[in-house]
Amino acid sequence: MFCFQCQETAGGKGCTMMGVCGKKPEVAAMQDLLVYATKGLSTVTTRLRAEGKDVAAEVNHLVTLNLFTTITNANFDEDVIAARVGETLAARDNLAAKLADKSGLPDAATWTAARDGFGAKARTVGVLRTENEDIRSLRELIAYGLKGLAAYMKHANALGKENAKIDAFAQETLAKLLDDSLDAKALTALTLETGKWGVEAMALLDAANTEAYGNPEITKVELGVRNQPGILISGHDLKDLEMLLEQTKGTGVDVYTHGEMLPAHYYPAFKKYPHFAGNYGNAWWKQKEEFEAFGGPILMTTNCVVPPKDSYKARLFTTGATGVPGCPHIEAKADGTKDFSALIECAKKCAPPKELETGEIVGGFAHAQVFALADKVIEAVKSGAIKKFVVMAGCDGRMKSREYYAEFAKALPKDTVILTAGCAKYKYIKLPLGEIGGIPRVLDAGQCNDSYSLALIALKLKEAFGLADVNELPIVYNIAWYEQKAVIVLLALLHLGVKHIHLGPTLPAFLSPNVAKVLVENFGIGSVTTVEDDIKTMIG
Ligand code: SF4
Ligand code: SF3
């Protein structure tokens, strides 16, 4: 195996024996094959579009689901992934039959094998297949951006929002990743274009979420527990949460959020459920201890899943793109609905969750809420009460070096405000950082995709201050990344013209020295150093 798609990759170079995330070589191989099969399918759909033929939404959804399945910490189930490879080949061949011109199709669009031949094929299609390290770096940077984009599309699709142009771009780009005639220059341009479509995908998801559930608003979220059994829901899928809240009504079972599901509390539509109890625990990487302590069933709607301990395996349910061998999986019915009664029955037999902490946190500062406070915020900047905003969005992770982010937050001068989104917030959102004239010093916009809100807020401030360039704002970017959704967020910010982003705790292993150099020279991307030095550089 060779995988270097996440920040925790072995030795900062690549996982070759076993994933640091727990991904086994045979699962890594099957994921490589699924990506390859999806590129083949995308080659066919791209040709069909060029011939003026329609591609059904189900095909777009299959591409999206396949990419999402291979994102870090989503799916560890080799059999499920292999079955999806089979499904993808069947869809590809079915569509290829409609092509008028079948000449020159690449191997990805024509190979075929039975299930027992998948392993051998997988060994020939991995990341290292591209020999030139710069081309490989750019191809993977784009592929990981598309994985993040696919994750956001999947959530938007679940809420009935479609944008066939985004799907067409993603598929055309996947097809281009097989094209050996594209040089580094062409792939660099494609990287930036991916960022543009990343903005579109985040905007689509924002519209899907806010139209379905209202605009996030300032909300206090309980951290303690109640005295009834509960279900813990993690990941990013709000539609799954809605169905779970509906089905648990009046059952005597509470619903708690975990990890990236925390921002669900900020949406008005979910406030009407009295059994929507609060948030339990922290970011994904602490789940082994926290899921054990929770004591009841857990629903993983998306990444990040950590391969579970046997002690709670039977009560860890997966759904959507997630999967863990040996854990129950809830499949959607043909109409997209899901039956969570197995979780409810399981919860009824469990004791109430064990308390980990008490208190509350405040969040809900997505674009509409911040725009409603715009006068107050602008005044605070003009009066000098707020000197700088620090965007600290992104991911959390288990590396010790990530303590940097807690220390950085603590060391920031009191006249700075942190803008955050994603699970990175768990490093500092529970710290007593105070407020400035009633504005909390940590403004949480929501999930990682709600980084889109942070971009809108920056654009609004630019307009309010009459600036020509978003980089003239008193905003600095110190972003923590872990998996591929952070890659699409990064590419989206680059597309919006944001410069001098600090990316940590380490730069991606998949950036070759030359590609890293291009990012440094054109966008001023930098790494992080020490808290002290970075405070000096970023805050002055
Ligand atoms: Fe390694 Fe990350 Fe890939 Fe897992 S996802 S195998 S930790 S690089
Ligand atoms: Fe976290 Fe996995 Fe990235 Fe959505 S849950 S931000 S790491």
Image (tube, rainbow, N blue to C red):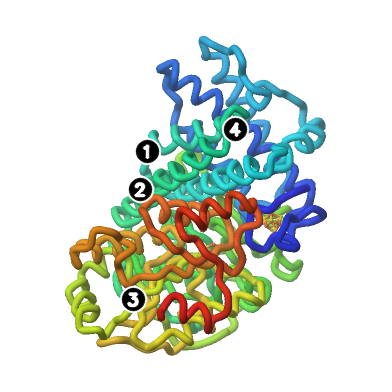
| Disc 3/disc 2 C-alpha distance (Å) | 24 Å
Q: Residues within 10 Å of mark 1 (few under 14, many from 20)?
A: some
Q: Secondary structure at mark 3?
A: strand
Alpha carbon of mark 3 to alpha carbon of mark 1: how far? Answer: 31 Å
Asked if labels 1 and 2 touch by Cβ distance under 8 angstroms, the answer is yes
Q: Which residue is mark 1?
A: 163
The type of residue carrying mark 4 is: Lys
Q: Say whether disc 2 or disc 4 marks the residue closer to the N-terminus.
A: 4
**In front: 471, or 244?**
471
* Contact between labelled residues 3 and 4, with CB atoms less than 8 Å apart: no
Q: Residue at x 64, y 51 (%)?
A: 512
- Disc 2 residue lies near ligand 2 with CB under 8 A: no
Q: Is residue 498 left or right of residue 23?
A: left
What residue would you read off at disc 4? 39
Mark 4 is surrounded, within 10 Å at the Cα level, by few (under 14), some (14 to 19) or many (20 or more) other residues, namely many
Q: Residue at x 63, y 40 (%)?
A: 135
Residues at marks 4 and 3, CA–CA distance in whole angstroms: 43 Å
In the rendered image, is residue 177 in sight? Answer: yes
Tell me the residue that label 2 is attached to: 204
Mark 3 lies on residue? 219
Disc 2 and disc 4 in contact, CB within 8 angstroms: no
- The local secondary structure at tag 2 comes to helix
